[in-house]
Amino acid sequence: MATSGRDNLERNWRGQNHQSTVKKAVTYYSRNSDDAYTAVGNLSPGTLITYLDSLTQDHLKAAFRLSTSEDVYYANIDYFVKPRSRQATATSLGPSSFGLENQSFLSSTAYYNQIINSINGRGDIGGELFDYLFELLDYVYNGAGDYNNIQLSGFPWGQIQNYYAEVIGPIACIKRGILSGMINTTGISGAQIYMPPDSERLYDYKIIIGGDEHMISAKSARGVSNQVKPQFVTSITEGSGKLGNLQVTKEFNLLKILGDNTVVAGALRGWSLIAPTEISSAAAQSIISVYRGDGHNLKVPDPQLLKPFIDKHITAKKSNPGSVTVGEVRYKCEQLIQNWSKVGSQNIVLKNIFDIYLNESRVIYVKMDLSKSTGVPSFSASSGGGSTLVRNLYLRSSNYATRTADRIGFQVS
């Protein structure tokens, strides 16, 4: 599926001159005043050339100069290394960059076609990288990929292995048999694919076979790197019927508050649950009632209600509580919840709750490995879950005093 011929010329070369090298031996030609071409000899791989856009007529006789001469020569452009996109090292290759997030696809074919359209429509992916992404896609969909004529040096390997793996992983699961022996794969050829929103997930995608949903992570099973929002944990653990006494703990009630409320209300009511003598329900509500949108710098409406909290946690403004902003109070509550969750018996309870979540969610880990010398991919799958993954766990805020983009969520490593 690599671009070649006229498509290669128009997509990768047209518009400006480019420095490049020969990638495989090619016959090159000179042209006389009668527009007749004469073979000069062969260029060896690695030879430096400068492509000349204004003198190029077509892909079969692309104009170029050698570094050792001012003469103009011509050769088939497919024998030159495609110029690398100037943004290649910063190119985003995750699902959202291809417009896949928060979408369901009825078949692997519909999903495959969406990826093709997305790659073709992206101007920031060019040259050899463009070809390589297509060949990896061809491998997972058709079982074959040709990497022999692709110059592999300089690729953003981390982006490919960590993020493009999320993009093509669903097709690999359906087409390449890597889930055999782990799940019932009867009917997997007709499986649906769901890509969740980027910000709220433990898993990277779902493979849906009939009524069975299988959550897949493209991360290593050695740890859970995604931040997991509390509403997912409470929903699955409550439905499992396995919480027992954990369901009436302060820790579980905190998760419910964080998941069921807005970012602002969750933080304020959460710390009020933990430390009601510092911030009462009335104090929390006084801020929630006026805190809207980006109004982080609004002064607290009733400093007297917040006095115990300010005196203990915002001491720099203890003498002037009326200058405290609602954003400062909300953010301090998030920090306090985060620090509280890291230690003591509450950390153990949170781990026990999360342990149930992992066992019930049944996440499968599908990893893509790549050879940087040959380009050949390989996939492996393993099941993970339970206490083997829960080493370091706490509730983490991704916000700051003037940002309320995310709910507090589980951070696990």
Image: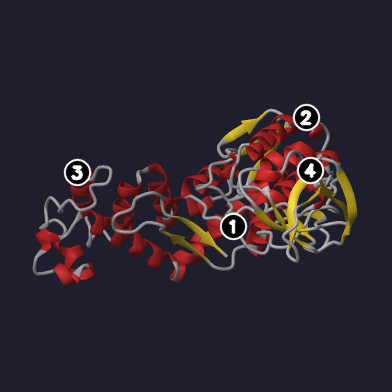
Q: CA distance from mark 2 to mark 3?
A: 51 Å
Q: Secondary structure at mark 1?
A: helix
Q: Nearer the viewer, mark 1 or mark 3?
A: 3
Of callouts 3 and 4, the N-terminal one: 4
Which residue position holds label 1? 355
* Sooner in the amino-acid sequence: mark 1 or mark 4: 4
Q: Which residue is mark 2?
A: 190
Quick check: marks 2 and 3 in contact, CB under 8 Å? no
Q: Amino acid at mark 3?
A: Val
Of residue 263 and residue 9, the one placed in the foreground of this image is: 9
Residue 340 lies, with reference to residue 284, above or below; the image says below
Disc 4 secondary structure class: loop
Q: Nearer the viewer, residue 190 or 373?
A: 373
Q: Are marks 2 and 1 in contact (CB under 8 Å)?
A: no
Q: Residue at x 19, y 43 (%)?
A: 290
How packed is label 3: few (under 14 Cα within 10 Å), some, or many (20 or more)?
some
CA separation, marks 2 and 4?
Answer: 61 Å
Name the residue: 9% across, 69% down.
319
Q: Nearer the viewer, mark 2 or mark 4?
A: 4
Name the N-terminal-most of marks 2 and 3: 2
**Quarter of the picture holding the C terminus:** bottom right
The label nearer to you, 1 versus 4, is: 4
Q: Mark 2 is on which residue type? A: Gly
Pointer 3: what residue? Answer: 290
* 303 lies left or right of 214: left
Q: Using the rendered image of the protein, determine whether residue 54 is visible from the camera's viewpoint.
A: yes
Identify the mark at residue 33; answer none if there is no mark.
4
